[in-house]
Image (cartoon, helix red, strand yellow):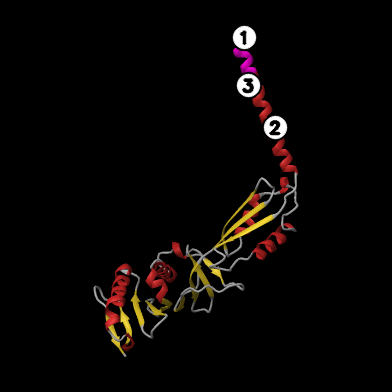
Amino acid sequence: MNGNTIIRILWIAGLFLFLGLVLSAVERKRSSDSSELKITVMDSVQMHFVRVQDIKSTLKRRFGHVLDGVPIRSLDVQEVEGVLEKDPFIREADVFIDAQNDINVTVWQRRPLVRVIDNAGNNYYLDEEGEYMPMSANYTARVPVATGRITSYHQNYQELEKHILKDLLKLIKAIHSDKLLSALIEQIYVDGEEEFSMVPKVGSYRVVIGKTDRLEEKLKYFKVFYKEGLPYEDWKKYSIINLKFRGQVVCTKR
């Protein structure tokens, strides 16, 4: 047996020994119990839909305990993530077990863009994806409120050819993405013709959008008028700022 063969045999033996040690360590870890449950709720300073205690309560209802001190081998992290993601206020959950056998749970809250009060009296939020969010007993988000002739929520409304919530979502995303508009607009109103108006936080005038066609152009003209026109005018004398007409801003005095 030459030297190369001996080296090859020793290398293979070492590899099997290493794999054996790894598998043994993995099995010891799987046989051990979990230590501490560590929960992180992202964006908890800005929003309070989900609290640490809420997550513990959800886990206890589903598993009968809050997962600390349970055998690692019996813990299915994907199942835990799935249970948490069924919460209407949780967008995503990530669960992993670290080297200290601590169970780390991180959840991301869903972000509402608008609160909707429809013509049937239903009260809910639409989130960043346009999905339904119920009202919360823990927290009320400070977002624009949409009222008026708004038909009831339909789960697949975004796939429909026409639905007033599709236009509302388009408008509220445009408002939310603009620093000035998001700070300025407090309410959105839908009239019987399915046309939109915006109500600012300051002042008693109404900004008429109409349909959401040419929306970028309409909002651009309004911002120019707001920044360059209103400072030189007495904005209190206006009751309506109308953006429906192409290329112009039409104001109605009181």
Is residue 244 visible to the viewer in this orientation of the structure?
Answer: no
Q: Which residue is situated farthest in the top direction here?
A: 1
Quadrant where the N terminus sits is top right
- Under mark 3, the amino acid is Trp
Horizontal side of residue 247 vs 13, given as left or right: left
Horizontal side of residue 128 vs 174, given as left or right: right
- Under mark 2, the amino acid is Leu
Horizontal side of residue 105 vs 178, given as left or right: right
Disc marking residue 21: 2
Disc 2, SS: helix
157 or 175: nearer the viewer: 175
The segment highlighted magenta reads 1-9
Q: Is 6 within the magenta?
A: yes
Q: Which residue is situated farthest in the left direction here?
A: 247
Identify the residue under disc 3.
11
Q: Contact (CB < 8 A) between labels 1 and 2?
A: no
Q: Residues within 10 Å of mark 1 (few under 14, many from 20)?
A: few
84 or 152: nearer the viewer: 84
Q: Is residue 242 above or below residue 98?
A: below
